[in-house]
Amino acid sequence: MKELRKNIFLQGNYIYLRALTESDLRGNYQFWLNDEEIIKYNSHGRFPYTLDQLKSYISSSIISNTNLILAVVAKDSDTHIGNISLNAINWIDRNAEIAFLLGERNYWGKGIMEEAGHLLIEHAFKSLNLHRIHCGTSSENLGMQKLALKLGMKEEGIRKEAIYKVGKYFDIFEYGMINPNEIL
């Protein structure tokens, strides 16, 4: 039997990245953004996410030239387990924000997003010719702070009391990195 060709955009050892598709809505994706534990440290979860909103999000991600939103797929099961994205790509200043969402809990703590992050950052610097990548995370999100450092980012600053969750304000820790291979 002929093997189906997968729509792989970037490939790692344990995962691959591909464009989001409407078929991703048949899996658990539609539940991640309403799950308190998954969205504990980010700005999601303030309003419920509906299937129609996710369909619209996927449709707009496909045609965007300022956001690159990719599905993270586990090679071992060919399952969509999360998303990774470059958001607010600024083509003049050549920078973007990187964001992570690992929705499938059984993949937490296994280095999945570190591998995905390295793939996307390399693509951002080598193929998209970006100069700088940055991210921000809640002062409570120790996992994301460790991930940013593992990806080679440096802590750049703190936005005091910049996010409101569970009845109180938290600081946002900002991380960033400059393209190490760039010759100016």
Image (tube, grey):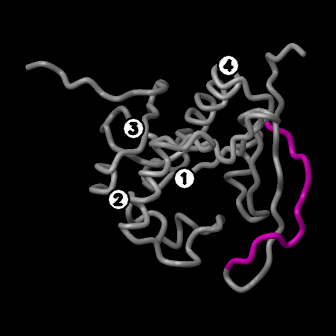
Q: Which sits earlier in the primary sequence, circle 2 or circle 3?
A: 2
Q: Name the residue under label 3.
A: 74
Lower position in the chain sequence, tag 1 or tag 2: 2
Q: Nearer the viewer, mark 2 or mark 4?
A: 4
Q: Earlier in the sequence, mark 2 or mark 4?
A: 2
Tell whether 122 sits left or right of 183: left
> Regarding mark 4 in the picture, which secondary structure is present there?
helix
Give the labeled residue for mark 4.
126
Kindly report the distance in space between the C-alpha atoms of the residues bearing marks 1 and 4.
Answer: 23 Å
Q: Residue at x 77, y 43 (%)?
A: 134
Q: Quadrant of the N terminus?
A: top left
Kindly check if marks 3 and 1 are in contact, taking CB atoms under 8 A apart as contact.
Answer: no
Disc 1 designates what residue? 101
Q: Earlier in the sequence, mark 3 or mark 4?
A: 3
Q: What stretch is highlighted in magenta?
A: 153-165
Q: How crowded is mark 4: few (under 14 residues within 10 Å), some or many (20 or more)?
A: some
Q: What residue type is labelled 2?
A: Asn
Residue at 49 percent across and 66 percent down: it is 33
Question: Label 2 vs label 3: CA separation?
Answer: 14 Å
Question: Circle 2 is placed at which residue position?
Answer: 28
**Residue at (34, 59) in percent of width and height:** 28
Task: Kindly check if marks 2 and 3 are in contact, taking CB atoms under 8 A apart as contact.
Answer: no
Q: In this view, does 180 lie above or below 21?
A: above
Rounded to the nearest whole Å, what is the CA distance between mark 2 and mark 4?
Answer: 32 Å
Q: Farthest residue in the top direction?
A: 183
Instruction: Point out residue 176 in the picture as x, y percentages from the top left corner.
Output: 82, 41
